[in-house]
Amino acid sequence: MNGKTADLLQGMERKQVAGIIIAFALLFGISSAPPFPGLKPQAQTVLAIFLWFITCMVTDALPKAIVGLAAPTLLVVMAKMKIPNAFDAFASNEFFLAIGAFIYAAIMMGTPLGQRIAIGITNALRSTRVTRILTGLSLADVVIGGILPTVSETALFLPISKGVTGLMRGREHLPESKRINTAIILMITALVPLFTGPLILTSHFPNIMLAGNLANAKIQVSWVDWFIYNLPLWGLLPILLLYVTWYFKLKGLDIPGADEELPKMKAELGKITWPEIWAAACIILGVFLWITEGTLHKMQTGMVAIIVLMLAFLPFGKLNFEKMNRYIMWDIWLLLGGAICVGNALNNSGAVGWLAGFIVNPIKAAGILSPIAVLFIIVFGFHIARAGIVSAAAMGATFIPLTIGLAKELGFNILPFSLIVINSLSYSFFLPISITAFLIAWGASGTSTWEAIKFGSLLSIIANIYVILVQGGWLTLIGHPF
């Protein structure tokens, strides 16, 4: 182990120890403090558990699975909640939908299916032009993005992106080569997965968390509902391509040899195997059943996910579960369950309404009543705190309950208000550490921090303005006004 690695590990350990100390200091300090004005004792304890949860997440003080299980346990032990109420999310539709999405992602990662789809679509364009290759890889990203959560999609596309940029080996010193390399890695490894994330219910951790919290507020959102609500966000994908092309000056540039290398990459995968065919058929069946929920059948999305998984691993499908198991994010699954439990407890105890008052009262005092103006203030205000939260799950756990509480306190329609705020926070590239996929891509690209900030900040502003204005108008048009 070299000195740099040892220093990094020591730094991580110090951060974790400090995180544990701070988390438990907040937990016991707030829960045992004199009653906060306007907050019931149980709600104060729930608030303390919430801050413990977020601190553990931000500092990686404890393993994610432990945090997910410990949070509702603390609700039982310290907040005196009944066990079925404290652990309610672990029996929810969204909890089972999440594990379905994670195992589908593991199948794509554990077989050549994901790479085969990505390289096949890109290869079909048969071009050396950078913009055409970006378009092909982006289309593959979008196709796979409906199945894979964002982090898994990033892991899948990083080696593919590296394979394409490796064609310029020996010319890395040229300015145009550097721009091409950076553009491909940032866009394909991070930005397209992140821009695709809010479009599909199963593609992004906060989507599932928001659906769970909305269900607690008696607002049911199906797979198709989510797709319809977020339909305008597809317009951000061509905007992203135009922005990357303009920012990195890619128009007219070529990658010599790409038209030969991509078919080679496809050939190396060999012929498609029976397990891949069976897996693809099961995934297509799952998407079909999600789309037809409420018309052909009444099975909820979570139950569909479990049924399709049972079919996928039937013996004649030849899918090796042990091989797929290493790719399944069991820890994130348990973390999501715990996060939704804490969010529900915050809302039901009244702690969210109390927290929302700190934001709502100044807005009302200033006489700001326009929903659009309020959204701009809240979204860009939240981005200040959002910048330091790398984990999408932690972002959802932090802001989803608060956003729903703000909607109630301000008298706005919960569904459109919360959807727009959380979607906006998903387009957060102000700092390269603001979101996991962007952090991975930034590290792989070798881009300086300042360059990443310049590139990401303008893109974040454009995307957030688009979400607030365009999606806000769309939701009003389809019957969900503010």
Image: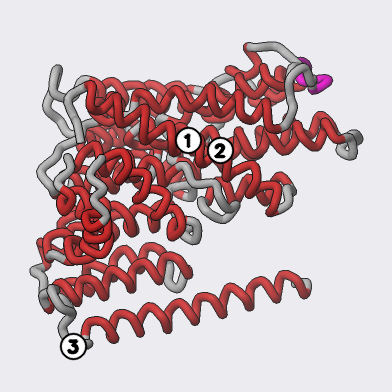
Q: Quadrant of the C terminus?
A: top left
Q: Nearer the viewer, residue 279 or 443?
A: 443
- The magenta stretch is 255-260
- Residue topped by disc 1: 463
> Are discs 1 and 2 less than 8 Å apart at CB?
yes
From the top left corner, tell me how far across and down residue 269 is, in percent.
64, 26
Q: Which mark is residue 459?
A: 2
> Does the stretch in magenta take in 405?
no
Coloring applied to the structure: secondary structure
Q: How many marks?
A: 3
Instruction: Sort mark 1 into few (<14), some (14-19) or many (20+) by Cα contacts within 10 Å.
Output: many
From the top left corner, tell me how far across and down residue 216 is, in percent.
14, 49
Residue 453 visible in this rendered orientation of the protein: yes
Q: Residue at x 36, y 39 (%)?
A: 101
Q: Is residue 231 above or below residue 426?
A: above
Q: Residue at x 15, y 75 (%)?
A: 79
- Residue topped by disc 3: 34
